[in-house]
Image (cartoon, rainbow, N blue to C red):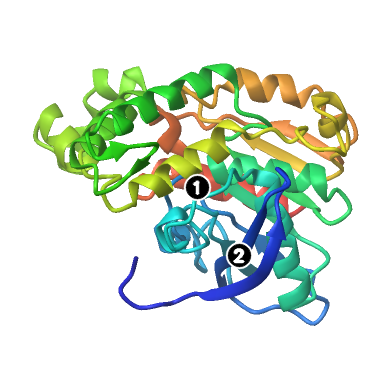
C-alpha cells in the first residue's frame, strides 16, 4: 500500500456471489483519472492484474501514455483479493468465499451506474488478469462495451495456464506458515519460492538466452533473480495471493447461467471492437488460445489479433521500463480508439 489513501471506496453492501454465498459489506477500491464528459461516454475501465494495486499500473496513464486522461475518464477498479478491495487480509479473519470474475464485473458495473451514472464504456483495457476481466465485460455487457483490449489475456484459463498456477500455489504453500488451509504468518520462504517459479514462466527463453536482464542494470542472472523476483510477491498477503490465484483459475467468460458453459455462445455474444494482443513469447497466455477465440468472435464489430513482437514474455504486456513494447501498445490502442 502507499501509506496514504489516494483512492475511493465503493461500498457495495451485502453481495450475493455467483456461488450463492453472501459476502457481507463488500468493498471495491478504485481510482479515477481525468474528467467525465457531459455525455458520460468517454470512460475507459482499466481493471488490475494479479497482485497489482492501482498505483502499480497507473504508469500507463498520462497525456503521452497508452491511456490519455486529457481525453478520457479512466477508472481503475482494484480486483478483489489485492489488499485494497475486499480481500482475506482486510476481511476480519473470516473465511474468504470463492470469488469469480463474474462477481468482480457485477460490482464494477454497480460502481459505474451508482457512483457515476455511466452506461457506456469507450474501452475496457486490461493486462493479464485485467485482460480476462476485459473479456468478461465484453461478453456480459455487449451493449455497454464499445471496445475491448485484451492484453496477454484470454476468455478462460487454459489447462496449461491452470497447471502453471498449480506450481505457483505449491511453491507458496510449501512454506511452514501455511497451516489448516491458510497462512498464519508471512510465508518468507514461500514468497521466494513463488518468485523463482514465476521467473521461469513470466519471461521467455530468448530473454534469458540473450541476457536481456542486463538492459535493466542487473549484473548477473542471480542478481536479477534476487532483486527482481525473490521479493516481488512479499509485498502482498499470502492469503490474498491465493484468493486471486483462485479467481484466475476459475476464469471463464462462459461459466454463468447466461451462457451455460458454452464458450461459443459467450464469444458470439460480444459486439465490441476487439483487440487481442497476446505476447508473442508469453508462455501461459498462449497466442494459440487467442487465435482460437478470434474465429469465434462472429458478432464483434471488428476483431483483430496483433501479438506483441517481444522477447519479454508475459511482461511484454506491462512494459514499465521497456519503451519499444510500450510504443507498440500505444499505437495499437490509438488505432482501436479511432474506430
Q: Is residue 194 left or right of residue 249?
A: left
Return the x and y of residue 77 as percentages of the image width and height. Answer: 58, 62
Q: Residues within 10 Å of mark 1 (few under 14, many from 20)?
A: many
Q: Is residue 284 left or right of residue 44?
A: left
Q: Residue at x 80, y 53 (%)?
A: 145
User: What residue would you read off at disc 1?
Assistant: 49
Q: Secondary structure at mark 1?
A: loop
Return the x and y of residue 337 as percentages of the image width and height. Answer: 71, 54
Q: Residue furthest front?
A: 180
**Mark 1 to mark 2 CA distance (whole Å):** 19 Å
Q: Residues within 10 Å of mark 2 (few under 14, many from 20)?
A: many
Q: Secondary structure at mark 2?
A: strand
Return the x and y of residue 283 as percentages of the image width and height. Answer: 46, 22
Question: Considering depth in this image, is 78 or 100 the residue closer to the camera?
Answer: 100
Q: Residue at x 63, y 51 (%)?
A: 125
User: What residue would you read off at disc 2?
Assistant: 26
Does residue 154 appear in the picture of this structure?
yes
Does residue 72 appear in the picture of this structure?
no
Amino acid at each position: 500500500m502507499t501509506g496514504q489513501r489516494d483512492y475511493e471506496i465503493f461500498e457495495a453492501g451485502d453481495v450475493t456471489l455467483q456461488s450463492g454465498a453472501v459476502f457481507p459489506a463488500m468493498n471495491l477500491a478504485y481510482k479515477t483519472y481525468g474528467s467525465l464528459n457531459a455525455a458520460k461516454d468517454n470512460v475507459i475501465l482499466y481493471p488490475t492484474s494479479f497482485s497489482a494495486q492501482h498505483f502499480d499500473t497507473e504508469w500507463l496513464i498520462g497525456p503521452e501514455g497508452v491511456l490519455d486522461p486529457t481525453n478520457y475518464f479512466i477508472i481503475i477498479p482494484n480486483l478483489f483479493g489485492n489488499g485494497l478491495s475486499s480481500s482475506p487480509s482486510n476481511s476480519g479473519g473470516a473465511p474468504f468465499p470463492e470469488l469469480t470474475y463474474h462477481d468482480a464485473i457485477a460490482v464494477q458495473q454497480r460502481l459505474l451506474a451508482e457512483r457515476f451514472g455511466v452506461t457506456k464504456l469507450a474501452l475496457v483495457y486490461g493486462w493479464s488478469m485485467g485482460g480476462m476481466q476485459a473479456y468478461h465485460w465484453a461478453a456480459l455487457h455487449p451493449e455497454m462495451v464499445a471496445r475491448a483490449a485484451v492484453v496477454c489475456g484470454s476468455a478462460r484459463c487454459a489447462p496449461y495456464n491452470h497447471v502453471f498456477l498449480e506450481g505457483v500455489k505449491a511453491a507458496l504453500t510449501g512454506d511452514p506458515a501455511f497451516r489448516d488451509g491458510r497462512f498464519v504468518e508471512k510465508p518468507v520462504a514461500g514468497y521466494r519460492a513463488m518468485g523463482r517459479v514465476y521467473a521461469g514462466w513470466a519471461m521467455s527463453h530468448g530473454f534469458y538466452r540473450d541476457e536481456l536482464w542486463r538492459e535493466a542494470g542487473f549484473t548477473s542472472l542471480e542478481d536479477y533473480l534476487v532483486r527482481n523476483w525473490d521479493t516481488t510477491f512479499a509485498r502482498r498477503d499470502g492469503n490474498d495471493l491465493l484468493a486471486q490465484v483462485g479467481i484466475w483459475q476459475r476464469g471463464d467468460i462462459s461459466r454463468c447461467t447466461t451462457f451455460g458453459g458454452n464458450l461459443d455462445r459467450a464469444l458470439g455474444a460480444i459486439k465490441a471492437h476487439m483487440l487481442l494482443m497476446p505476447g508473442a513469447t508469453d508462455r501461459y497466455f498462449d497466442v494459440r488460445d487467442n487465435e482460437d477465440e478470434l474465429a469465434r468472435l462472429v458478432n464483434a464489430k471488428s476483431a483483430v489479433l496483433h501479438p506483441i513482437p517481444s522477447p519479454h514474455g508475459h511482461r511484454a504486456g506491462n512494459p514499465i521500463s521497456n519503451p519499444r513494447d510500450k510504443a507498440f501498445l500505444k499505437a495499437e490502442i490509438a488505432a482501436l480508439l479511432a474506430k
